[in-house]
Image (tube, grey):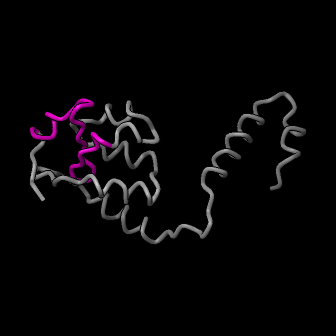
């Protein structure tokens, strides 16, 4: 695994060469950009820089972490991890197991539907089809 400096990382900030650093690891996501569920623009916003805060803010799935590892090309030699929040986050994330046959997209869709209905004029009748 190669060690890279921030100056190396900063050279790769467009769609033809899209690198991002997350928790001190460098990933070349150029070939993944078109497949990224959040869209290519999200990746372009953090390309050539540290995307840790953005990545963790979104709350990616375990599958996203596994996919990300496939694109690691190096580590930042001048990475500063402050209070090592990444290690603490990993320790907590590992403790949470995905329930068997879970359907997170269904939960998201129901949440969005409830939110949309909550803003309708007749809230009580709009939620009558949901079980709580």
Q: Please identify the quadrant where the N terminus is shown.
A: bottom left
In x, y percent, where is residue 121?
Answer: 84, 27
Left or right, 12 with respect to 44, comes to left
112 on left or right of 93: right
Asked whether 32 or 44 is in front, the reply is 32
Q: x, y (%) of residue 37?
A: 46, 42
38 left or right of 116? Answer: left
**From the viewer's perspective, is residue 27 above or below residue 62?**
above
The stretch in magenta equals 7-31
Instruction: Tell me if residue 22 is in the magenta stretch.
Output: yes
Near-viewer residue (3 or 37)? 37
Residue, x 82% and y 49% (percent of image)? 130
Image spot of residue 102 (x, y percent): 62, 63
Q: Is residue 51 magenta?
A: no
Front one among 40 and 21: 40
Q: Name the residue rendered at 10%, 55% in the picture.
A: 2
Q: Position of residue 83 (x, y in %)?
A: 26, 58
Quarter of the picture containing the C terminus is bottom right
Task: Report the label total.
Answer: 0
Q: Please give the name of the residue rendered at 72% of the width and 34% of the height, measured from the top-left corner.
A: 116
Name which quarter of the figure residue 112 lies in: top right
The residue under the point 26% across, 35% down is 47
């Amino acid at each position: 695994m190669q060690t890279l400096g921030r100056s190396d990382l900063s050279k790769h900030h467009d769609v033809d060469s899209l690198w991002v650093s997350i928790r001190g690891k460098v990933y070349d996501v150029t070939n993944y950009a078109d497949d990224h569920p959040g869209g290519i623009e999200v990746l372009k916003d953090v390309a050539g820089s540290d995307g840790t805060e953005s990545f963790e803010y979104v709350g990616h799935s375990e599958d996203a972490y596994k996919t990300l590892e496939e694109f690691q090309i190096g580590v930042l030699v001048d990475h500063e991890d402050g209070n090592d929040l990444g290690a603490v986050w990993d320790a907590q994330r590992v403790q949470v197991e995905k329930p068997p046959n879970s359907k997170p997209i269904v939960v998201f869709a129901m949440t969005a539907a409830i939110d949309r209905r909550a803003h309708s004029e007749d809230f009580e009748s709009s939620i009558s089809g949901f079980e709580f």
